Amino acid sequence: MLIKRVPDIKSSEITDKTLYMNRRQFIFRTATMAGVGLAVPQLLFSTANHPEKKLQVKVRGKYRLEEKMTSFKNAASYNNFYEFSTGKEDIDRLSQNFRTRPWTVSVEGHVKKPKTYDIDDLIKMFPLEERVYRFRCVEAWSMVVPWIGFPLGDLMKIVEPTSKAKYVEFTTLYDPEMMPGQRSRILDWPYVEGLRMDEASHPLTFMAVGMYDEVMPNQNGAPIRLVVPWKYGFKSIKSIVRIRFIEQMPTTSWVKAIPREYGFYANVNPKVDHPRWSQSRERRLGEFRKKKTKIFNGYAEQVAYLYAGMDLRKFY
């Protein structure tokens, strides 16, 4: 399918990240001089376990929006990551010591070439792309982020799924010592998500290893996460350790926990409200005024054909 290209974001609309990074360095130096030791300010994320902080992006401008990007500050300090906490502003602090090296991702199930990949080897296999996507959470907040990574479909071409593969199941790391939220019973850990094969192989489906030209911050899903821009954020599973190609639809974490509120498809649909709040409007992080939510999060032209003939209220 032809993917529509839209003009690049104007440079004047992009938050000056250099100013923000300088502020972070100043805060850190001030805290160190004050003798606070391990009391690292929020918004700082550890890169000690990464071979390098910057990512070498080779492809830019292919998938971009005519919308102002969310600042790095907002995108890195307000997150859903229940493995650490249910508090959205606690994640950056609680994930400071999360170790992302060594790390492996195992590809299993109905594939001709199953393999366990070291994360750094996996990253080197593909030319890294920057994609500026809308990101919409079920709680009615949203952001526009420059993700860095590679299409999931490119990995699928290498491992060669067989005809038995109908779904792709993703699993997050299970480590309650590093992920304190996993000590709670809010979900049946580890976190599991899934896609149909046609959704997984769609050109927009993305494996992100960074954002804003840097390695993925711990609080945003380091070292590798899924980004499916036409679906609600809980489909974009973080800190992935296993990708499994299976015949039957997987029982995903939120469907298992609260099936009345969360469906398998999770397509952004302003006409289908969450049982406890409306989904017709959303608020961008860093902005006060709400805006109307777009069907499929604004990606209807690219993905609506995947659901032709389906009742999107029943298959929510």
Image (cartoon, rainbow, N blue to C red):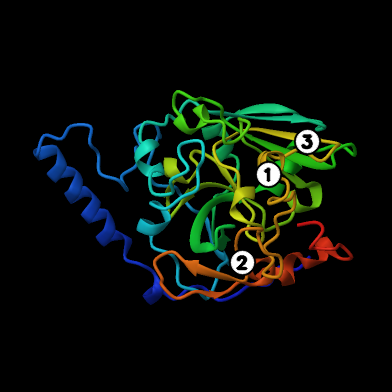
Please tell me which residue lies in front, 176 or 114: 176
**Is disc 2 placed on a helix, strand or loop?**
loop
Q: CA distance from mark 1 to mark 2?
A: 17 Å
Residue 178 percent coordinates (x, y): 44, 27
Q: Are marks 3 and 1 in contact (CB under 8 Å)?
A: no
Residue 295 appears in view = yes
Element carrying mark 1: loop
Image coordinates of residue 67 in percent, x first then y, are: 50, 74
Q: On the image, numbered disc 1 is attached to which residue?
A: 258
Instruction: Please report the residue visible at 51 percent of the width from the left and 55 percent of the height from the top.
Output: 147
Q: Is residue 101 left or right of residue 206?
A: left
Mark nearer the N terminus (3 vs 1)? 3
Q: Is 22 above or below relative to 247?
A: below
Query: At 80% across and 42% down in the image, what residue appears?
Result: 167
Give amino acid for label 2: Ser
The location of residue 219, given as percent across then percent down, is: 43, 43
- Indicate whether 72 appears above or below 30: below
Q: Nearer the observer, disc 3 or disc 1?
A: 1
Picture quadrant where residue 64 is located: bottom right
Residues at circles 1 and 2 in contact by the CB criterion of under 8 Å: no
Q: Which residue is mark 3?
A: 245
For the residue labelled by badge 3, is the local secondary structure a helix, a strand or a loop? strand
Residue occupied by mark 2: 278
Using a 10 Å C-alpha cutoff, classify the residue at mark 3 as few (fewer than 14 neighbours), some (14 to 19) or many (20 or more). Answer: many
Which mark's residue is nearer the viewer, 3 or 2? 2
Image quadrant holding the N terminus, namely: bottom right
Q: Mark 3–mark 2 contact, CB under 8 Å?
A: no
Three-letter amino acid code of the residue under disc 3: Phe
Cα distance in 3D space between marks 3 and 2: 34 Å
